[in-house]
Image (cartoon, rainbow, N blue to C red):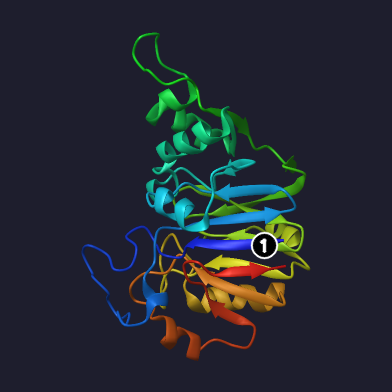
Amino acid sequence: MKVTILGSGAAGGVPSISRGWGSCDPAEPRNRRRRPSILVEEGGSRILVDTSPDCREQLLDAGVQRLSGVLYTHEHADHLHGIDDLREVNRAMGGPLPIHGAPEVIDSIRTRFPYVLGCVEEGQSIYKPMLEPHVIDGPFELGGLSIHPIEQDHGFCRTLGFRFGDFAYSTDVVNMPPESFEILASVKVWVIGCLTMHPHPTHAHLERVLEWIARIHPERAFLTHMTPSLDYKTLQGCLPQGVEPAYDGMVIHI
């Protein structure tokens, strides 16, 4: 399995409009971060997790024209609002693309982007429905891959993490129920969101993330969804063995 980190930044990216580079060294290319997304590849399958506002550039950089499907962690803008860029994938494939999300995510897409699902009256859109919605209500298969959703607490809403065999992806999470840790048990590689050094009401901070990693004990862990407060080399220097900051374009083989 091959996992590409398409975006390792938080909602504002790095540099951000309000904070610029923050504590990040602009001379370090791994500090330039787009909004969060990953690409999972296995055999002939390609699965995109989230359509960030940077989706177009992310897919171009990864050389992606075709996808087996898209998974959504939740409906926040930094994870969803690049959805229109899937029109180009739809065009390249010549047919609709399956998307998978929690019920509230699919409902939000119907409300905010009705044309992508064909939920508009005739004559109000020139686009054919380009996406096929599927509600996640338990483990499922996509492109020949078995996927286990992971329930996560995002403070004011829930999110989903995903486990693909020996790999798991968890972002936008501040707490997890015991059953989620059971799903993560024995995972070998874990990409986990780490927003800042300090506690936050909706995202795990470094101390909590390291506690979780010690509990799950994966062979390797990578931190993502990082704000301008987390400089790549500074963070790298204070992490235990087997834990690294992710960066845009990073490729992980499992």
Residue 174 in sight from this viewpoint: no
Q: Residue at x 32, y 60 (%)?
A: 12
Q: Nearer the viewer, residue 77 or 207?
A: 77
Residue located farthest toward the left when viewing the structure as drawn: 18
Q: Residue at x 54, y 86 (%)?
A: 239
Q: Say few, some or many: other residues with alpha carbon within 10 Å of mark 1 (under 14 / 14 to 19 / 20 or more).
A: some
On the image, the x and y values in percent for residue 179 come to 72, 56
On the image, the x and y values in percent for residue 65 come to 54, 44
Residue 88 in sight from this viewpoint: yes
Q: Residue at x 41, y 58 (%)?
A: 35
Q: For mark 1, what is the residue?
A: 2
Q: Residue at x 44, y 44 (%)?
A: 80
In the rendered image, which quarter contains the C terminus? bottom right
Q: 95 above or below 67?
A: above
Q: Amino acid at mark 1?
A: Lys
In the rendered image, which quarter contains the N terminus? bottom right
On the image, the x and y values in percent for residue 132 come to 58, 28
